[in-house]
Image: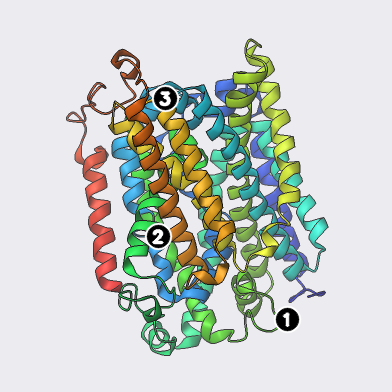
C-alpha cells in the first residue's frame, strides 16, 4: 500500500507532535534524579503501588495488546479473551501473592540475578543472554507496529517511521531511565483508553449491537469455551486441554511471573505490600482490555470481510488501523494515532529498560567488568539503551514474516518463558532443586522449543495458536523433568544459602495489620472470582 488511507489535517499532526514533545520533557524533568544505578534501573524502589500497577499493565500494552489482540479477535473470535482471563489473571495473582516476596525480599536487581542467588552463575548467564535476545526481538514488534501505523495512516515510509519512533523512545529512556518509562506508561494507559474506546462503540453500533455481532459471527467464533472439546469446534482450533495447559498454565505463568519486563515494575515499588499488590491490582483493568481489542476485532470480521485476503488491504494486523480510518474524523484521528503510538512506545520502552538492566548487571558487570564504579554502570546503562534500540530497528523487519503479531509473540514466549517458569517453580518450592539441575533444565526446555519449532511443519498443528500452546507445554515439561532428574544426581545448595529464596525457608509476611483492600490475598481472591464469573458469562 503506497498511499495513506486518510490524509490527516493540521490538528492531527499537532496532537501527535505535542505528545512526542511531552514524553521527552518527562525524561528531561527526571534527569537530575538519575544519580545512581538504583535510580536509573529500579527508580530507587520508591514508586507508589498504584503507579507501579498501572505501569505494570501499561508495559504490556504494546503492539501485542493493541494491533495483535485486535488481529487475534478477527482471526479467532471471542476466544481471544482467553489471553486476558485464564491467560493472565491467575498468573498475575500468583506473582503477587507467592513470588514477589522472593523477588523483592531477596533484593535481587533482576530476574537473572535471582537465578544466580537460587542456582548458580551458569543459570544466570543462560537466562540473561536469552532474555536479552528476547527483549530486542520483542522491541522490534513495537517498532514495526509504530512504523505500520505511520505508513498506513500518514503515508510515511517504513524506514522513516521506524527511525523516528526509535529516536523518541531513545531520548526519554536514556535520559530518565525506568522512572521516566514508568510515569510515561501511566499517562499512556489513560491515553490509550481515551483514544481507542470510540472505535468499540462505533463498530458495535454499525453491526447492530452486541447480540447482533454474536449472531453474525462465523461458527465457533461467538463462545469462549463451547466447542473446545475438539479442535474443529472453535475459531482458534485448540481443544480445552491445550488452552488450559499451554496458555492458562505455561505461557501465562511463564510470562507474567518470570518476564523481567513486567516484574521490573513491581520491583520498583516502595515496599513489599506495594510490590505484591502491583500485579494483583493490575489484573482488574486487564480483564477490561477486551473492550478495546477483542470486540473491535470481532466487529471487523463483519465490517472488513476482505481483510487478510486482498493484497491492497494487508493482513490481520491491519484491522485496527483500518477501523480508525473508517470512523475517525480530523482531530479524533490525531488522538487515535497518538493512542496507538503511546501503546507501542510503552511496550518498546518496557523492553528497552529491561534490556539495559539485564545487560548492565547480569552480563557486563557479572562477566566483563566486575569492579567498576556505580557511575560507570550508570553510563553503561545509557549506552546499552542506545545499542538495544539500534538492534530493535533491525529486528522490526523479522516481524513482517508472521501473519499476526500475536503468533510472533507467543512463539518467543514458548522459547524463553515457558521453560524458565519450570525452573522458577521448582526453585522456589523445592529446596532440593540443585544449581546444575536449574541450568540443564533451562537448557533442555529452550532446546525442546527449538526442535519442535524447526522440526515440525507449520501445518502439523490446526492453527498457529495451537502450535504455540503445545510447544510451550512441551518446553515446560522438558525443563521440569530434566531439572528434577539432574537434581537427584547433583549436589544441592546448603539450606542456609536458600533462606529468603525458597518457600518454607523464608520469613512469613504478615498482612494482618492492613485493611482488607490492601491485603494481597484478599485482592487476589476477588480478582479470581471476577475472572470466573466473566468466563461463565462468555461460555
Q: Vertical placement of 373 versus 479: above or below?
A: above
Q: Which residue is mark 3?
A: 435
Residue 311: assigned label: 1
User: Disc 3 on helix, strand or loop?
Assistant: helix
Q: What residue is shown at x 70% (from left), y 29% (from top)?
A: 382
Q: What residue is shown at x 59% (from left), y 30% (from top)?
A: 357
Earlier in the chain: of badge 3 and badge 2, it is 2
Instruction: Measuring from the top left, give residue 364's x and y in whole percent.
Output: 65, 23
Instruction: Measuring from the top left, give residue 148's x and y in whole percent.
Output: 71, 64
Mark 3–mark 2 Cα distance, whole angstroms, equals 34 Å
| Count of numbered marks | 3
Earlier in the chain: of badge 1 and badge 2, it is 2
Residue 534: assigned label: none
Mark 3 and mark 2 in contact? Answer it, CB < 8 Å. no
Circle 2 Cα neighbour tier, 10 Å, few/some/many (<14 / 14–19 / ≥20)? many
User: Disc 2 on helix, strand or loop?
Assistant: loop
Q: Which residue is mark 2?
A: 84
Circle 1 Cα neighbour tier, 10 Å, few/some/many (<14 / 14–19 / ≥20)? few
Amino acid at each position: 500500500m503506497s498511499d495513506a488511507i486518510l490524509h490527516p489535517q493540521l490538528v492531527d499532526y499537532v496532537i501527535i507532535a505535542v505528545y512526542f514533545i511531552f514524553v521527552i520533557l518527562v525524561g528531561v524533568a527526571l534527569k537530575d534524579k538519575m544519580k545512581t544505578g538504583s535510580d536509573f534501573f529500579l527508580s530507587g524502589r520508591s514508586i507508589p503501588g498504584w503507579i507501579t500497577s498501572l505501569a505494570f499493565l501499561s508495559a504490556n500494552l504494546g503492539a501485542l495488546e493493541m494491533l495483535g489482540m485486535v488481529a487475534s479477535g478477527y482471526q479467532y473470535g471471542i476466544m481471544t479473551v482467553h489471553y486476558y482471563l485464564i491467560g493472565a489473571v491467575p498468573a498475575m495473582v500468583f506473582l503477587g501473592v507467592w513470588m514477589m516476596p522472593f523477588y523483592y525480599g531477596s533484593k535481587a536487581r533482576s530476574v537473572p540475578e535471582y537465578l544466580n542467588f537460587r542456582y548458580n552463575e551458569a543459570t544466570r548467564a543462560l537466562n540473561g543472554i536469552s532474555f536479552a535476545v528476547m527483549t530486542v526481538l520483542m522491541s522490534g514488534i513495537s517498532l514495526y507496529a509504530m512504523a505500520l501505523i505511520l505508513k498506513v495512516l500518514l503515508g510515511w515510509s517504513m524506514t522513516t517511521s521506524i527511525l523516528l519512533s526509535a529516536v523518541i523512545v531513545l531520548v526519554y529512556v536514556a535520559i530518565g531511565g525506568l522512572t521516566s518509562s514508568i510515569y510515561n506508561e501511566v499517562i499512556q494507559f489513560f491515553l490509550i483508553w481515551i483514544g481507542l474506546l470510540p472505535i468499540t462503540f462505533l463498530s458495535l453500533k454499525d453491526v447492530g449491537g452486541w447480540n447482533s455481532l454474536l449472531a453474525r459471527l462465523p461458527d465457533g467464533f461467538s463462545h469462549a469455551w463451547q466447542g473446545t472439546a475438539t479442535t474443529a469446534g472453535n475459531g482458534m482450533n485448540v481443544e480445552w486441554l491445550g488452552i488450559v495447559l499451554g496458555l492458562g498454565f505455561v505461557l501465562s505463568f511463564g510470562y507474567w511471573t518470570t518476564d523481567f519486563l513486567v516484574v521490573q515494575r513491581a520491583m520498583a515499588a516502595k515496599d513489599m505490600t506495594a510490590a505484591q499488590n502491583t500485579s494483583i491490582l493490575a489484573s482488574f483493568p486487564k480483564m477490561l482490555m477486551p473492550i478495546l481489542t477483542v470486540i473491535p476485532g470481532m466487529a471487523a470480521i463483519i465490517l472488513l470481510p476482505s481483510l487478510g485476503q486482498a493484497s491492497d488491504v494487508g493482513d490481520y494486523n491491519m484491522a485496527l488501523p483500518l477501523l480508525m480510518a473508517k470512523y475517525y474524523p480530523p482531530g479524533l484521528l490525531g488522538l487515535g494515532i497518538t493512542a496507538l503510538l503511546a501503546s507501542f512506545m510503552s511496550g518498546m520502552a518496557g523492553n528497552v529498560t529491561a534490556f539495559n538492566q539485564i545487560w548492565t548487571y547480569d552480563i557486563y558487570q557479572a562477566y566483563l567488568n566486575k569492579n567498576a564504579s556505580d557511575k560507570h554502570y550508570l553510563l553503561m546503562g545509557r549506552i546499552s539503551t542506545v545499542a538495544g534500540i539500534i538492534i530493535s530497528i533491525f529486528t522490526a523487519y523479522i516481524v513482517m514474516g508472521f501473519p499476526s503479531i500475536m503468533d510472533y509473540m507467543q512463539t518467543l514466549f514458548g522459547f524463553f518463558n515457558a521453560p524458565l517458569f519450570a525452573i522458577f517453580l521448582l526453585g522456589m518450592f523445592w529446596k532440593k532443586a540443585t544449581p546444575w539441575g536449574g541450568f540443564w533444565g533451562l537448557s533442555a526446555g529452550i532446546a525442546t522449543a527449538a526442535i519442535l519449532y524447526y522440526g515440525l511443519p507449520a501445518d502439523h498443528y490446526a492453527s498457529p495458536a495451537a502450535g504455540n500452546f503445545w510447544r510451550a507445554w512441551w518446553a515446560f515439561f522438558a525443563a521440569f523433568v530434566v531439572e528434577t532428574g539432574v537434581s537427584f544426581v547433583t549436589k544441592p545448595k546448603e539450606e542456609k544459602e536458600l533462606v529468603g529464596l525458597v518457600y518454607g525457608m523464608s520469613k512469613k509476611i504478615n498482612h494482618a495489620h492492613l485493611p482488607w483492600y490492601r491485603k494481597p490475598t484478599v485482592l487476589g481472591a476477588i480478582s479470581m472470582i471476577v475472572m470466573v464469573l466473566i468466563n461463565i458469562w462468555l461460555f
